[in-house]
Image (cartoon, rainbow, N blue to C red):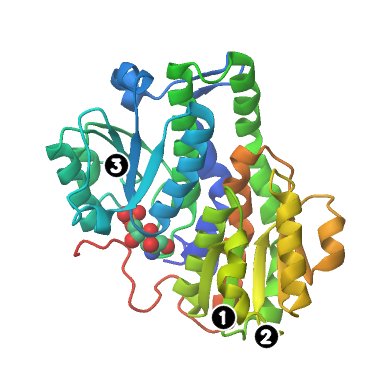
Amino acid sequence: EELEKGGFDHYMLKEIYEQPRSIRDCMRGRINAAEGKIALGGIKEYANKLKNVERVVIVACGTSWHAGLAGEYLIEEYARVPVEVEYASEFRYRNPIINERDVVIAISQSGETADTMAAIEIAKDKGATIFGICNVVGASIPRVTHAGVYTHAGPEIGVASTKAFTAQVTVLTLMAFYIAQQRGTLTTSKLTSLLTELNSIPEKVQTVLANNELIKDIAAKVKDSRNCLFLGRGSGFPVALEGALKLKEISYIHAEGYPAAEMKHGPIALIDKEMPVVFIATKNSSYEKVISNIQEVKARKGIVIAIVTKGDTEVEKMVDYCIEIPDADEAFLPLLATIPLQLLSYHIAVMRGCNVDQPRNLAKSVTVE
Ligand code: AGP
């Protein structure tokens, strides 16, 4: 087992550190940046279907559902197709309105989640085309879907999903660009520049990992908190949800993720000097709005930890702790901003003496409903 952990104290930490490689593996052979082209062999038979698709419905659970939300932003933004993201466990019991013109994307690391399997069967019965995004090759979900794209993140042992999430988001990014390519909603030059930048994401993830010691110091300051809020806007919102899920899964600290603007509709009541609030405050379209949300939290003495774009000095002046990530197009924010949150949860959980790789009450794949 020690050998399998590759010198890391836990599988989770090893898997966090594997992300530059797992994201690269996920893109391998699928991108031709110079020509602005994407090849997704697993779904190529459906290229025509995607050209005219009217709606995409994403079904998943847990972290995979968060990846689905990140996918919604990407597919709507670049391919201009309306997307709905559904909890598989709700979708299956709702007599959902689905027809043969819909494409349903089922996301699952394990490929064995019972609720996601059931959602697929229902959508299939109603005539939809089903794509899978799975990590485990040959699992049940890839066998029942019409087509799909594997994430190729490699085995994920830690119960808390890390590298599988970033690989799912990478596949969804590729799918969004692929659908855009079929529908002609992105010019070749725009696609070329996006793909060139996507190619540089593994290196950028590596630079985020270099903040590990700083993140560990921040973890030491907030490890005894009883609650924690994670706030982000736009594609920072799924990152906030995933950050909160990671923290509660492995450290047992109560954590909530919210769209930052929703704070004033309720969660703001919780803020006092004991409450850490993690903001995704990178320089993208919602930057100014997030800054005003940070001011609202500071005015109530909350402890603010901000994920910021490298070189940002404005946010630094108003918050307690800053973690920098490299500048990147908004499309790639979830791939970078998630990494410090994984490390923060990891260190907090270790400092609290929790079983990081096998948290209580959780199983790696949930094969019962
Ligand atoms: C993630 O950290 C979880 N342990 C859990 O939410 C998981 O993502 C969920 O059960 C879905 O699993 P799947 O991706 O294997 O379908």
**Residue extending furthest toward the front:** 265
Q: Is residue 329 visible?
A: yes
Q: Earlier in the sequence, mark 2 or mark 1?
A: 1
Determine the CA span between mark 2 and mark 1: 8 Å
Q: In the image, is the residue at mark 2 within 8 Å of ligand 1 by its beta carbon?
A: no
Q: In percent of the image, x 34 and y 28: which residue is there?
A: 54
Instruction: Provide the residue designation for mark 1.
Output: 227
Secondary element under disc 3, as helix, strand or loop, is: loop
Classify mark 3: residues with Cα within 10 Å, few (<14), some (14-19) or many (20+): some
Q: Specify which label sits upstream in the sequence, 3 or 2.
A: 3
Dot 3 beta carbon under 8 Å from ligand 1: no
Choose the circle earlier in sequence order: 1 or 3: 3
Instruction: Describe the element under mark 1 as helix, strand or loop.
Output: strand
What amino acid type is highlighted by mark number 3? Val
Instruction: Give the vertical position of 280 relative to 230 (above or below).
Output: above
**Residue annotated with mark 3:** 137
Q: Is residue 339 left or right of residue 63?
A: right
Which residue is depicted at the point 40% across and 25% down?
40
The residue where tag 2 is placed is 274
Amino acid type, mark 1: Asn
Secondary structure at badge 2 equals loop
